[in-house]
Amino acid sequence: MAASDLELVALVVAFRDQRAYSKLVERYEVLVRAMLTRMTGNHALAEDLAQDTFLRAWRKIDSFSGKGSFKGWICRIAYTEFLQSYRKRKSTAKALDKFKAHSDIENQSRGDWDSGNAMDLDWALAQLSEVERSLIVLCYSTGLTHEEAATASDLPLGTVKSHIKRGKEKMREILIANEPVIR
């Protein structure tokens, strides 16, 4: 039987057990990388942030209290790494340019979208504000509850719900407006 997250954390805290930590990384690396890729829109940047996330988690593992899930805790660290990276940029416009998965995504013709060369969902996410995009990714890509996303983002629960609702409405409008016309 596989050890629980709490058992693995206890081994890491008590004995600095690298094998136990490796098991935690194996459990959550795909989730963290996917979350960061969606948030940044840039695979290379997401890889760097994921590595930073797991390094920070290793150093701070004894601060995990066990009150929430380890998944929520590691997602909070990843979100913090994302925000720190984002804030290092001089302006929002520059940051969004760096975060785009494809530097030419806005210049692609409608035919490119129809042929599947880019994902409509990622394109719609890129049109949202940083906060809306991040919270939608936290909840829908990583599977965190609104409460866990509120903890991870350090925002009040009501604010998280409002941003997610607005973001989903914007995405719906964007996707409907860019839906191909079938004749």
Image (cartoon, grey):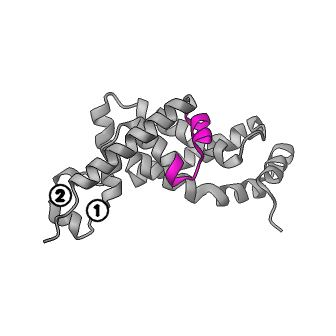
Instruction: Say which amino acid is labelled 2.
Output: Gln
Q: Which mark is residue 24?
A: none
**Up/down of 123 relative to 53, above or below:** below
Q: Is residue 146 left or right of residue 132?
A: right
Residue at figure coordinates x 81%, y 52% from the top left: 17
Q: Is residue 18 left or right of residue 139?
A: right
Q: Is residue 139 left or right of residue 123?
A: right
Look at mark 1 in the image and give the residue it sits on: 118
Q: Are marks 1 and 2 in contact (CB under 8 Å)?
A: yes
The residue carrying pointer 2 sits among few (fewer than 14), some (14 to 19) or many (20 or more) residues within 10 Å by Cα, namely few
Q: Is residue 2 left or right of residue 97?
A: right
| Circle nearer the N terminus (1, 2) | 2
Is 140 contained in the magenta span? Answer: yes
Q: CA distance from mark 1 to mark 2?
A: 9 Å
Is 22 contained in the magenta span? Answer: no
Residue 6, horizontal then vertical, whole percent = 80, 50
* Quadrant that contains the C terminus: bottom left
Residue 21, horizontal then vertical, whole percent = 73, 53
Q: Which of the two residues, 46 or 144, is positioned nearer the viewer here?
A: 144
Residue 46, horizontal then vertical, whole percent = 46, 50
Where does the magenta region start and end?
139-153
* Quadrant that contains the N terminus: bottom right
Residue 89, horizontal then vertical, whole percent = 36, 31
Look at mark 2 in the image and give the residue it sits on: 108
Whether residue 16 is visible, yes or no, is no
Q: Which of the two residues, 102 or 175, is positioned nearer the viewer here?
A: 175
Whether residue 35 is visible, yes or no, is yes
Q: What element does badge 1 sit on?
A: loop
Instruction: Say which amino acid is labelled 1.
Output: Ala
Residue at figure coordinates x 56%, y 59% from the top left: 30
